[in-house]
Image: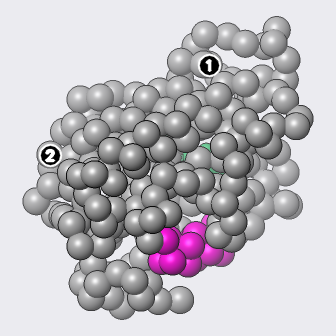
Amino acid sequence: MKLGSFPHGFKALVIGASGGIGAAFVDALQAQENCAVVDGLHRNSSPSLDLSDETSIANAAQCMASRGPFHLIINAAGILHTADFMPEKKLGDLYFPQMQATFQANTFGPAMLLRYFTPLLAKDRAVMAMLSAKVGSIEDNRLGGWYSYRASKAALNMLVKTAAIELKRTQVNTVLFALHPGTVDTRLSAPFRGASIGRPPALAASEMLAVIDKLRPEQSGNFYTYDGKQLPW
Ligand SMILES: NC(=O)c1ccc[n+]([C@@H]2O[C@H](COP(=O)([O-])OP(=O)(O)OC[C@H]3O[C@@H](n4cnc5c(N)ncnc54)[C@H](OP(=O)(O)O)[C@@H]3O)[C@@H](O)[C@H]2O)c1
């Protein structure tokens, strides 16, 4: 699969490059003939980027500025569970530290990525993809549960939509969108039968890159799945 909508020698940046999907994006982009630079950032990269620390985000953006401008930026970071918590099943499970950690990684940190990294996007052709989740769709919520994760992704989607409206005025060639990867076999999905029902990360990355390749500025500010279908908010 060739990313034909991107110029020869294009530059890509993957945030959350240490994750299952993030690492697969790095590999897939490195295999692209027309891609000259694939940079990856994560909590242990140099520079490091921690989504719960605004200073680290600002510093990473400043360090990366001279490597850009980037034609493609993908944020593949996010959390559903940690060693300290699992997604809530009922209201009685709600607990502040879980909500705070989830919103920092899935919402507030990505908001700061929008602030500090959109100025690093190329002016001719640029896509910024924010990995979201279908369970963040308010309209599609039928099962309930997973309060913090659902709400953090719904709020992320609002930030993406709002920033896309601003960028339509200031960076007219930019496509900014929320992207649902489908169920993928990674650490995140492991406790939920990810190994049996999830797609391999390499397949998911190549499907999502095919979606990214097709998107044009008129489609900025929307929510798409890995197979190119538009999701309701
Ligand atoms: N896998 C699925 O089935 C699925 C389904 C729907 C949506 N998604 C979304 O897809 C994205 C990627 O998930 P994945 O499946 O690849 O999960 P993963 O393998 O667990 O990777 C998650 C990534 O997020 C990073 N991260 C977590 N907290 C961070 C923080 N505070 N600062 C910086 N980086 C942080 C992790 O870094 P460390 O390596 O340092 O921990 C890792 O790079 C997430 O946004 C997730 O919500 C996944």
Residue drawn at the location 25% of the way across and 42% of the way down: 116
Asked which quadrant contains residue 185, the reply is: bottom right
Tell me if I can see residue 104 in this picture. Answer: yes
Q: Is residue 32 above or below residue 21?
A: below
In the image, 37: left or right of 5?
left
Amino acid tagged 1: Gln
Type of residue at label 2? Gln
Find residue 56 and report its horizontal and vertical position in percent.
Answer: 26, 34
Q: Which residue does the image show at 29% across and 61% down from the upper left?
A: 172
Residue 63 screen position, x and y as percent: 15, 49
Residue at the disc numbered 2: 62
Q: Which mark is residue 123?
A: none
Label 2: state its secondary structure.
Answer: helix
Residue neighbourhood size for the residue with mark 2, other residues' Cα within 10 Å, grouped as few (<14), some (14–19), many (≥20): some
Q: Is residue 187 visible?
A: no
Mark 1: few/some/many CA within 10 Å (<14, 14-19, 20+): many
Q: Is residue 209 magenta?
A: yes
Q: Which residue in the structure is indicated by mark 1? A: 98
User: Which residue is painted at 68% across and 39% down in the image?
Assistant: 136
Q: Secondary structure at mark 1?
A: helix
Give left or right: position of 63 versus 88.
Answer: left
